[in-house]
Structure formats: structure tokens, C-alpha cells
Amino acid sequence: MSVGQIIKFYRKEKGFTQSELAEIIGVSIQAVSKWENDVGMPDISQIVPLARALHISTDTILEFNKDAELEDIISMRETIGHHPVDFSFEEAERIYKLAHPFFEKHPTNSEVAFWCLESLSVLLPQIKNSDNRYELLKECIRYENCIFRYETNADMMFKSYYVLSRCYKALGELGRADEIMERIPSTFGDRAYWEAEFAYAEKDMDLAIEKCKLSFHDKARYISRCIRLVRRISIELEGEDGIQKQLNLNEYMLTLINAFLSGGEYLPHRMMYQKMSLLSGMVKQYVDFGMINRAIECMEQLIEARNRYFDFIRRPDEKHCLMFLEGDDDGIWHLTPERIEVYIESAWEKLSSSQDTPNSEILRQIESKI
């Protein structure tokens, strides 16, 4: 692949338009178009910003990675698939057997290094022989060094610290585990979120929920992750107690989102999207929990938030919106309106099908607004 083809491939993989990529790295759309058509080449000063925007190494942009490696990594992503931090021993074994031989061939590939590190963090606690465990720990450190040297995505680096800390904790080296966690910045909520994941993996659900609250309070980008983690926690907690804890935290997060959105004409794009995602889930949960009046209130808030956001899209010059953040890969924002309509439709389908709705006139009024 040429440099232009590599840029085009990873731009599309991240969901960026040429205009969006140009805005992120501070060049014209014509420059990006010339690169991708192999009419021109990025200036040397633009290589690092490009790598950060596309979350790849500078080596990848400069063609040090061969086509075969790129094809193999795409195939491996499909084979390995997505998994949470607490996947099973069997799954960890399967991933490691796939990823380790690949890493031996390509020891600068940080993505594969992370797969190896993450799978070993699950396998380590099951190894009884202390010599074998420390040999595997050496491998973990080798993978971590690769990630530190070649990874450009800060979030991936933070996650790798969390995973390496789990490895040390499995060996009983609690001081070293804490020291690794200290590498994760606490200022913006990153450490609190990964401490929540740590607590969840250790089945300390109350601590995980408290850390979710702390992370959510400190950093908006972890809203969706906190929501997903709390849902996983509630699934593992038995009966109504688990559901109630999830509903309580959802209400807490909704209160904070509304506080963030109370700044007049300033419209944080991520906050609006996460508010609608959260409200859609709350409608369904309250219906399942038999709290129909609260479900109706959440449905009305969901429609109001949708209308406010669409009003911004129609008249963007009248408002200020933080649409993109450097290094932000949590959403493909140009698809957001379509996703919002899915949230509206799925929440409405759940609410309108409930047999417990006290007043059909209320439903008719809501439906007229949809």
C-alpha cells in the first residue's frame, strides 16, 4: 500500500471524512485529498499529528509495516473479536495462542502486544508454579514496553497500565500493582474508571459503582463506559437489588449531564448524545421495573433532548458546539442523527407496548411529538 492508501484506509476505519481529518490535524481538505490520491506527500511535521489522529504508529504511515501484516491484523481482529476485561480462562487461552506467534513476527505491533498482555492477565492467576508465573510476567513486561514505545492512543496506554497492574496483583505484589496504577492520570477521571474495572474484575461491585461515579464526575468521555460497566454489574447482582443500583446510578449520571448542559447556548456534542443514549435505556428499565410514570418522564426528556440537538444541526451558526476532540474515537459523529432516531424508536416501542400505562392520552401526546 502507498502512503496515500494507508492514510485513506485508516481514515475510513476511524469513520472520519477527509474534511474532519483535515480539521483535526490543521490542514486543508485539498491536502488530504492529494495525499490519498498519491499526488502529494504529508510534510514531515504532519506525520506525528496524522499518527495520533488515526491512532497508528508513524512507522505504519511511512510504510514500514508490510501489506501482509496489515491484512493479517485485520483478519485477527475479526477472529479475536470484542471482549470485556473479565473474559474467561478459555477465551484468554484462545486469544494468546493466536496473538503470541503474530507478535513474535511483528514485535513492534502494539495492538497485538495488548492482546497478549490482556490474555496473560487472565491466565496468570491460574498458574500454580511460581517460576512459570514469573516467566509469564517477564512476557507481560515485554508487551508493555512495546505498547509504551509504539502506541499513540493514550487511552490504550492507560488500559495497558491497568492490565499490567492486574498481573502484579495476581502475583501478590500489591505495592507494584499500585505503583503501575499511579501512572494513569487522576486529574481527568482515567484512573478512577480503570479502578472501577479493577474492582469489577475482583467482584467488589459497591467499590466499582463508587469509582464509576468518581470517573463520571471528573471526565465526560467516560460516561458511556460507566453506563456499560454498571449494566454489567447489575446483571451479576441478584434480583431487584442489582436493578435498583443501576437505576440509582443512571439517575445520578443524568443529573450530572443536565448540570453540564445548563450553560446556555454552549452545547457539548458528546453530552447530548450520551444523554439520549442514557435516557433511552432508562425508559426501558423503568418499564421493566413497573415504574411507568418515571418511564414516561424519561421518554419526554428524550424527545426534548432530540429536538434541541436537531435544532442545533439546523442552525449551527447560532450556537457553539464542541463537535470533535483531539484523540476522540468513541463515536462516528456524522451518523449521530440516525443513531438518535434508533434510540427514540426503541424506547417508544418499549413504552407503548407496556400494559401498565395509566393514561392512553399521554401516549398519544408523546407519539405526536415523535
Image: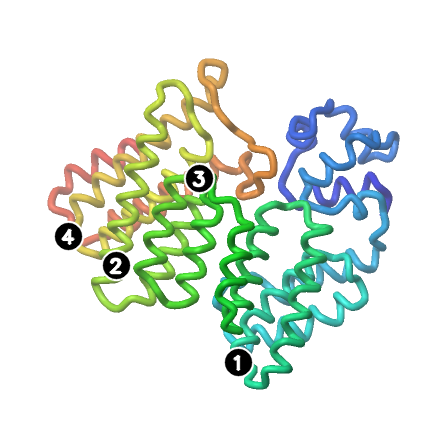
Precedes in sequence: disc 4 or disc 2: 2
Above or below, 66 relative to 153: below
Residue ID at (80%, 59%): 69
Q: Which mark is residue 126?
A: 1
Classed neighbour count for the residue bearing mark 2: other residues with Cα under 10 Å, few (<14), some (14–19), many (≥20): many
**Mark 2 element type:** helix
Residue denoted by label 4: 356
Label 1 – label 2 distance at C-alpha: 32 Å
Which amino acid lies under the numbered mark 4 shown in the image of this protein?
A: Asp
Which amino acid lies under the numbered mark 3 shown in the image of this protein?
A: Lys
Which amino acid lies under the numbered mark 1 shown in the image of this protein?
A: Gln
Residue ID at (35%, 19%): 264
Q: Which mark is residue 243?
A: 2
Precedes in sequence: disc 4 or disc 1: 1
Residue 290, position in %: x, y? Answer: 17, 55
Precedes in sequence: disc 3 or disc 4: 3
Above or below, 266 relative to 246: above
Judge depth for marks 4 and 2 and give the one in front. Answer: 2
Judge depth for marks 3 and 2 and give the one in front. Answer: 3
Precedes in sequence: disc 1 or disc 2: 1
Residue denoted by label 3: 219
Classed neighbour count for the residue bearing mark 3: other residues with Cα under 10 Å, few (<14), some (14–19), many (≥20): some
Label 4 – label 2 distance at C-alpha: 19 Å
**Mark 1 element type:** helix
Residue 12, position in %: x, y? Answer: 68, 42
- Left or right of 22 in this view: 358: left
Label 3 – label 2 distance at C-alpha: 25 Å
